[in-house]
Image (tube, grey):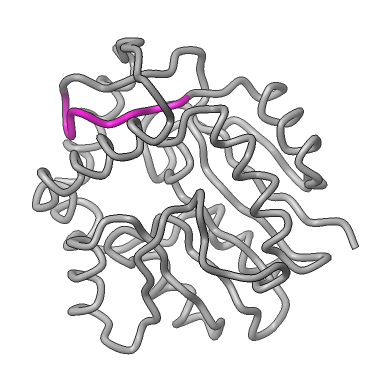
Amino acid sequence: MADCAESIVASTLASIEGQAISSPRDAVAQTAQAYHDHRERFLQVWGKSPYRCPPLLGDFLRFARRKAYLLDLGCGAGQDARAIRRAGFRVVGLDLNRSLLDYARRRSPRLTLVQADVRNLPYVTGAFDGLWAAASLIHLPKIAVHASFRRLAKLTKPGGLFAATLIHGRHSGMVQNGWIPGRFISRWHKQELARALRRAGWQIIELKIVSNQERKGRWLNLLARRPI
């Protein structure tokens, strides 16, 4: 099931239409609605299928200090947040989509879950030791990602970690067909992303292009640190 759905996602991303949107908020609202409308399809792949820990998540947790307080941005059905908690870390799973959070709560009643927008997080400066964002920032227009990088740096303690996966490529816009239509997708070149991170105050530990790991296609795997 997962391999089939991932193939659909990969072919969809290759044919993104650069449809204009009136604002970044419109893009996020449309994407949230798309995930709500197709939540059962999403959950079949990212909630009910056997879980495999992403390689980048493993690297992130090895770098994190013992019992670190971590934030899973765009946690969806909570699979990664559960893995983080099982590994002995304190974690908050955050997502904009209430229906996905409801599923995560049913699966893991003890997991701390919060409904919020990544662009307006309900936390104070230096609240977390690390941030994990798997395929969540891809749904923000680049202007919003630049601002989010700055806000996320402030949210992280000095020396704290930031790991994320973003889509490698050129074209950004609305996905009009495929696995979950109606989502906004942004794509980045490696050097473009590196410049945005450094300007936001992040020190890059590793930024590399990977192909066909936990998701089909070409992705950028990021591991960064907030300077001490």
Q: Residue at x 56, y 82 (%)?
A: 89
Please tell me in which quadrant of the rendered image residue 161 appears. bottom right
Frontmost residue, 53 versus 192: 192
For the C terminus, give its image quadrant. bottom right
The residue at 52%/24% (across/down) is 168
- Please name the residue shown 35% across and 10% down the image: 18
User: What is the x, y in percent for residue 113?
Assistant: 37, 74
Residue segment shown in magenta:
178-186
Q: Nearer the viewer, residue 102 or 151?
A: 151
Choose top left, top right, bottom left or bottom right for residue 3.
top left
Magenta-span inclusion, residue 105:
no
Residue 70, percent across and down? Answer: 58, 72
Q: Residue furthest front?
A: 22
Q: Residue furthest right?
A: 228
Query: Relative to residue 127, is residue 84 drawn left or right?
Result: left
Q: Report the front residue among 198 and 67.
A: 198
Place residue 198 in its image quadrant.
top right
Across and down, in percent, residue 74 comes to: 40, 55
In the image, residue 182 sits, relative to residue 96, either above or below, namely above
Q: Is residue 47 left or right of residue 210?
A: left
